[in-house]
Amino acid sequence: MVRVRRGFTLIELLVVIAIIAVLIGLLLPAVQKVRAAAARSQCSNNMKQIGLALMNYESVNGCLPIGDSRGYLNLPRVTWQALILPFIEQNNLAALYNYRVDWDNPLNYAAIATQVKIYNCPSTVTGLRFDRTPDEPLGGTEPRAACDYWNVNEIAPWIGINCGFPNASFYNGSRYDPLLAGVLVNTNVGIGTPLATIADGTSNTYMVVESAGRPNFYYTGGRQSAPPGYAGDWEPNNPNPGNGTWNGEACWADPYASFDLKGSNPSNGYVQPFGAASNTCSMNCNNHNEIYSFHTAGCNFLFADASVHFLSSSASLCVIGALGTRAGGEVNPDY
């Protein structure tokens, strides 16, 4: 009788382990791509729901909400994100929010600290965030729930000049040049923009973009902290971010968190003073009041017809600028 031992030899076991390791190595990138695609799809769906809410708001009120209310006409300072809460099934939060006072009034502390899931992109690496930085002009450290989706107030005048937009002119003291203004912007008459007045066409004009990750500072490639030599952009009130945070705005209720599209330097991610020729990056170079996402090779844009488009980060600043004006009269190229 011969006893036969059944089992693997050490060499066979090592070969099996090596094969499994190779398969895992091949599988992980595919899993990561699937997860990234799912997160981007969910982000797009968030913006779609926001778009439908804005459309419903316009249907009820005859105009879109004011996107940048900073105390004009002695009205309480409020954001469009706060105004559309009843239209995104956030009635309880809308009831908690006091629309008769400024957003940062103590009466609103509980409301503005409430995270709204639809306002956060799942691709954002920091997840749900709170903005505890002092705010202008009153200051304070109460927790404020962050948002990844914002409106562009206007296109910086130098973009209009450099790109040959019709009748574009340099800043002349009036905050919003009608030819360079965005969709969700204060019209200085106390009402928002009616859809019928978007002369460039609702399908050719975006109204909400991604500016993700705030209040943390990110620049090209999802890197956190300031790039080498960064000393703040041309806005005089913004300090050096230093360790990766900056005294910026991120709360969904904060009207100061909306921004003007300025473009930035693709080599180091920051904005050079007043329209320098090096400001050619249209998105994903930094999230300091610029268009930015954690998706690969682009960002989601919500257009004024409530459609969502993923635009490539290779799109020129002229194209993104032209698509951002509601009545600029530009001939919009394919995007």
Image (tube, rainbow, N blue to C red):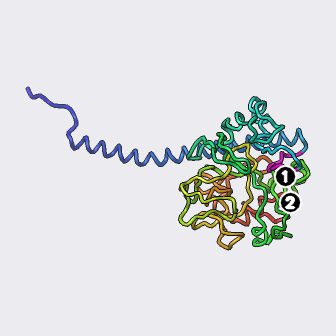
Q: Nearer the viewer, mark 1 or mark 2?
A: 1
Who comes first in sequence, dot 1 or dot 2? 1
Query: Mark 1 falls on what kind of element?
Result: loop
Quarter of the figure with the N terminus: top left
Query: Residue 64: within the magenta?
Result: yes
Q: CA distance from mark 1 to mark 2?
A: 14 Å
- Mark 2 sits on what residue? 327
Q: Which residues are magenta?
A: 63-72
CA neighbours of label 2 inside 10 A, class few (<14), some (14 to 19), many (20+)? many
Residue placed furthest toward the left? 1
Q: Residue at x 86, y 60 (%)?
A: 327
Image location (x, y in percent) of residue 196: 90, 51
Q: Residue at x 87, y 53 (%)?
A: 187
Quarter of the figure with the C terminus: bottom right
Image location (x, y in percent) of residue 267: 57, 67
Image location (x, y in percent) of residue 323: 77, 59
Residue 92 appears in the rendering: yes
- Occupied quadrant, residue 83: top right
* Nearer the observer, 167 or 80: 80
Query: Looking at the picture, which amino acid does disc 1 mark?
Result: Asn
Left or right: 166 with respect to 159?
right
Q: Residue at x 68, y 39 (%)?
A: 118
Query: Mark 2 falls on what kind of element?
Result: loop
Q: Is residue 226 above or below residue 77?
A: below
Left or right: 13 with respect to 41?
left
* Nearer the observer, 247 or 38: 247
* Nearer the observer, 8 or 287: 287
- Mark 1 sits on what residue? 186
Image location (x, y in percent) of residue 108: 74, 36
